[in-house]
Amino acid sequence: MAVKFYKPENQVPLEMHKVRVVQKLSLLPVEERLRKAQEAGNNTFLLHNKDIFMDMLTDSGVNAMSDLQTAAMMQADDAYAGSESFFRFKEAVKDVFGCEYVLPAHQGRACENILAETYVKPGMVTLMNFHFTTTKAHITRVGGSVIELVKPEGVKPQSTLPFKGDFDLKRLKKTIEEYGPEKVAFVRIEAGTNLIGGQPLSLENMLAVADVCHHYGVKSVLDASLLQDNIYFMKTREAQCKYMTTKEIYHLLADKMDIIYFSARKLGFARGGAIICHNKQFFEDMVQFVPLYEGFLTYGGIDVRSIEAMTQGLYESLDMEYLCQGPEFIEYLVKECADYGVPMITPAGGLGAHIDAQAFVPNMPHDQYPAGAVAVALYIAGGIRGMERGTLSEQREPDGTERFAEMELLRLGCPRRVFTLSQIKYCADRVKWVWDNKELIGGLKWTMEPPVLRFFYGTLKEIGHWQEDLVAKFKEDFGDSL
């Protein structure tokens, strides 16, 4: 939790841990950063990690593990079937969530694949507060479609609304009645809505969505990958949660939801994932797909050392002194940038700080990929790798036309227990420099566009020579400094 400093001008987020293992970083000269960006096809996913100073692409699988997690990995039982590591994990799931049935899978999108294969049939709809890239891809791949029902405030960049990820409950009921419950594969509740700035849902709204689902006989599915951030916001922004323990919130949600799945690359600071539930029938519906896609039922595509780290990580996800660092560092970075005038998504959410790229370069058309362009500009300016979360991350419509994203965001992910405050301040400084030189930023166009999840490995090139102009301005302002 936040620690109050004696002198208000010294108030900063305070790490509730100490660093015991370090990894050396390098910061390439600006000319080299330009060359590396162009060699990577202006796609930050394709940069080599050795060429990056601050990797803010994601918090998925790159959170720092604790000493207890590292120690737990040494007791791993590497049996193909019946591993004791799995049964320790299963016991942790029961303790943290209260759920009896556990299906391991190698990460969150593997869980989404199993859910889509089990419950989505051609012509069915899946309702959610907001889609995520891989979730939507799995659903559309098997003939389903996605309808987003987030409250209108959810896609407004600047706001004071504490829970911008909440469902619009009236639209949820209306949509179920319009399509009929039999046409709704499930309602997916994404805690900490990824594509609109990591914005949380209130506990009140989550429980209300579950009640609507039960009333209509529709399955409720909670994507709990970012639940630990969401619970931090519940505890700090929602009156009814202030005096609840984190475990009480986990259990209450698990009791209400039909199915929960998560990526342990996010929830629990480790690797892996799982689908969990109370209902034996749901378990039996899905269990066949674990051996088919993931491996045996007691490892699910996860190496046993990671299962042990995931087990310890679940317990650490109950600890507010661990949970607070991500949101508090993100809030600090958002405030640093917003106070300077940089258009940021507010209030600060989980996962990372989000730049409103459409407002950053307001005259750039969606089909020149503003968020992707700003991402490349920031890498050139500071060796900082962020992730485009805008039109580039969408998929084209069936007729081949571009689907323009509702929000053009550059996400600056803040992995837990990784960055120091000086690095966060460096990031803010370079964002401010790019903002002051935003008129130099031009667009991007495809050189190789994959048909599915194109943002992962597609390549683009700059329109014109704006990147060289940006380097020249950097040299003018910073001289020989990196």
Image: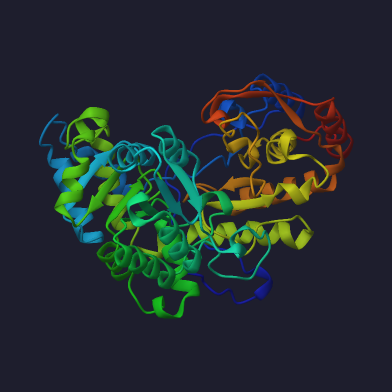
- Towards the viewer: 292 or 108: 292
Image point (21%, 35%), residue name: 299
Residue 265, located in which quarter of the rendered image? top left
Residue 315 appears in the rendering: yes
- As drawn, the residue found furthest toward the right would be 476
In the rendered view, would you say 263 is above or below 52?
below
Image point (43%, 65%), residue name: 173
> Residue 233 location, x and y as percent?
48, 67
Along the horizontal axis of the image, is 134 left or right of 364?
A: left
In the rendered view, would you say 210 is above or below 386?
below
> Residue 351 location, x and y as percent?
51, 52
Residue 454, located in which quarter of the rendered image? top right
- Towards the viewer: 283 or 431: 283
> Residue 83 location, x and y as percent?
13, 37
Image point (41%, 78%), residue name: 242
- Towards the viewer: 101 or 169: 169
Image point (50%, 64%), residue name: 171
Colouring rule applied to residues: rainbow
> Residue 177 location, x and y as percent?
41, 61
Along the horizontal axis of the image, is 443 left or right of 476?
A: left
Q: Quadrant of the C terminus?
A: top right
Residue 49 appears in the rendering: no
In the rendered view, would you say 437 is above or below 402?
below
- As drawn, the residue found furthest toward the left would be 82
- Towards the viewer: 11 or 443: 443
How many marks the image carries: the answer is 0
